[in-house]
Amino acid sequence: MTAIIEKVLSKDEVREFRAMLDKATWPDAKAVATAGSLARLVKNNQQLDEASPLAVDLGNRILRNLGRNDQFTAYAHPQRLYPPRFNRYTDGGSYGFHSDSALLHVANSSVVIRSDMSATLFLSEPDEYEGGELEIETASEVEAVKLAAGDMILYPSGALHRVLPVTRGARVASFFWVQSMVRDAGERSLLYELDQCVQQATIAMGAGNPTVQQLAAIYHNLLRRWADT
Ligand code: NI
């Protein structure tokens, strides 16, 4: 299951981010070791130096916004987040089908993150570039994703995915990984659906309704059962 988290950044924030990112130096991503050796063979894009003050600053701003985002919290139950990175596809740049490494070491620290979910936060508007769809292979279909600037998709890190060649303009995005307190994707998905039901029932019947109270208790009992902190 994938989820779109809208407006992680406002349009004003996107403009601010882009004003800085468009002036930055973008080395070839092959020179920056993020992908495993298999993935590196299919990777053809540019990536901002993750240790640069700009990457660190903008990454922290994204993390702050996500900390305040109820939809992200309800869907992901985040435990650890990989510091956001930034990439840019232009001039036919693409990234062939791959899945993401399971364990990711955060640079210059002893922190290891299990990639339960991968995130792409779009920083270019869809009309700024041609191509560049993020294709995610699920059990039944291939989902092609191209979101408005400021919106983000979360998808299972184990799903095969690719970025189609960008044939006009530039596709700028931030990407990172999320380790969830709820490790199992099926359990996360059930919790999210139940959470939506509780919210709808609260609107329809009122928070004091006994059935609503019972549903909410079931939600929290499942979370208690499945979450590791
Ligand atoms: Ni990937």
Image: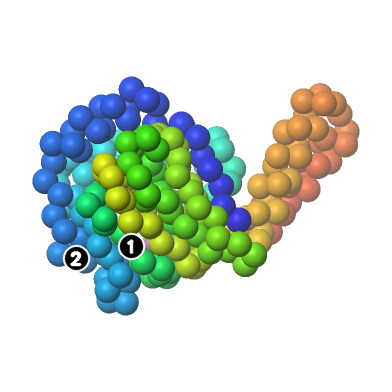
Q: Is residue 21 left or right of residue 79?
A: left
- Local secondary structure at mark 2: helix
Residue 186's disc is: none
Q: Position of residue 11 (x, y in %)?
A: 37, 25
First along the sequence among labels 2 and 1: 2
- Amino acid type indicated by mark 2: Lys
Name the residue tied to disc 1: 95
Q: Residue at x 72, y 33 (%)?
A: 199
Q: Is residue 124 left or right of residue 135?
A: left
Tell whether label 1 touches label 2 (CB within 8 Å).
Answer: no
Which residue is farthest right?
A: 210
Q: Position of residue 30 (x, y in %)?
A: 19, 65
In terms of image quadrants, where is residue 53? top left
Q: Position of residue 138 (x, y in %)?
A: 58, 63
Which residue is farthest bottom?
A: 38
Name the residue tied to disc 2: 30
Looking at this view, is 18 or 135 the one in front? 135
User: Looking at the picture, does residue 139 appear above or below residue 16?
Assistant: below
| Quadrant where the N terminus is found in the figure | bottom right
- Local secondary structure at mark 1: strand
Q: Is residue 183 visible?
A: no
> How far separated are the C-alphas under marks 2 and 1?
11 Å
User: Looking at the picture, does residue 73 appear above or below residue 178?
Assistant: above
Looking at this view, is 197 or 219 the one in front? 197
Q: Position of residue 75 (x, y in %)?
A: 58, 46
Q: Residue at x 78, y 48 (%)?
A: 218
- Mark 1 C-beta closer than 8 Å to ligand 1: yes
